[in-house]
Image (cartoon, rainbow, N blue to C red):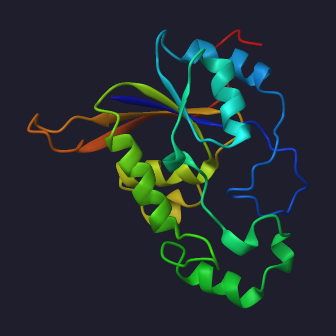
Amino acid sequence: MRLFLIRHPRPLLADGICYGRLDVAAEDPQPVAARLRPLLPAGTPVISSPLQRTRRLAAALHPQPSCDERLLEIDFGEWEGRPWERIERGLLDAWASDVLHFVPPGGESVAMLQARAIDCVGDLCGSDCALVTHAGVIRVLLGHWLQLPLGEWIRLPLDFGSITLLELVAGNGDGRPPAGAILHYLNRRGAEGAP
C-alpha cells in the first residue's frame, strides 16, 4: 500500500502565529496541483483534511476527493491564532518536556493526533491513496510507520506543497496491520519537467 502524503500550500498568515486547526486560506493550489499531479498514478483516490488549505488542493488534484476529520492538524486549543511569543512560557516549556503527551489548554496531544491519523490509514484497506493534509499528520505517520525516535520525526522538515511517498509493507496476510514501511522520497516538489 502506497501513501502519497501531500502537504497543503503555504497559508496566507503572518509568520509566528500558532495555526494548527485554524481554518486559514492558503496560496493558490492550482500551480501546486500541476506540479504534483504527474507524481500520482491515474485513479489514485484523494482524501483530505476538511480545512480549506487542504480541501482546495485536493479538489485541484482529483475530481471527487473525500474528507476525513482524522487528517486535521493538531488542535492547539486556546493557542490557536495567537503569536507563539504571546503563549505563556511555562506552558511552552511543559510542552517541550513532554512533546508526545502534553495537551495545550483546550487542545489535544501529539499522541492523540497520532492515534487518529493511524486509525485513518488503518481504514484504507490496503489501497494506494493520496492524503492531502498537514505537517503534523505527515510527521506522526512517518514516525510511526518508519519507527523513528520521537526527537527525529517531530523535527522532520516538510515543505509546503510537497509530496512524500511512504509504502507500507504488508504483514503476513493474516489481517494484521502492516509490519513497517519504506520511505521512497520526502518533500518532492514535482515531476521532472513539471512547471
Residue 142 image position (x, y, % from top left) = 45, 48
Where residue 174 sits: x, y (%)?
8, 38
> Which residue lies at the image location 59% right of the left edge and 17% below the top edge?
62
Quadrant location of residue 163?
A: top right
Residue 102 visible? The answer is: yes
Indicate left or right for 66 with 121 as reference: right
Q: Quadrant of residue 52?
A: top right
User: Residue at the spot x=79%, y=20% of the render?
Assistant: 31
Instruction: Report whether 191 appears left or right of 111.
Output: right
Q: Is residue 74 left or right of residue 20?
A: left
Numbered label tally = 0
Residue furthest right in the image: 14
Question: In this rendering, is residue 108 above or below 9?
Answer: below
Residue at x 62% of width, y 49% of height: 135
Q: Position of residue 97 (x, y in %)?
A: 56, 83
Q: Compared to 71, does 85 lie above or below? A: below
The quarter of the image holding the C terminus is: top right
Q: Residue furthest bottom?
A: 90
Eyeballing the image, is 85 above or below 57?
below
Of the pair 127 and 59, the residue shown nearer to us: 59
The percent coordinates of residue 150 (x first, y second) are 47, 65
Give the quarter of the figure containing the N terminus.
top left
Vertical comparison of 173 with 153: above or below: above
**Whether residue 160 is visible:** no
Q: Quadrant of residue 124?
A: top left
**Camera-nearest residue between 24 and 182:** 24
Which of 4/182 is in front? 4
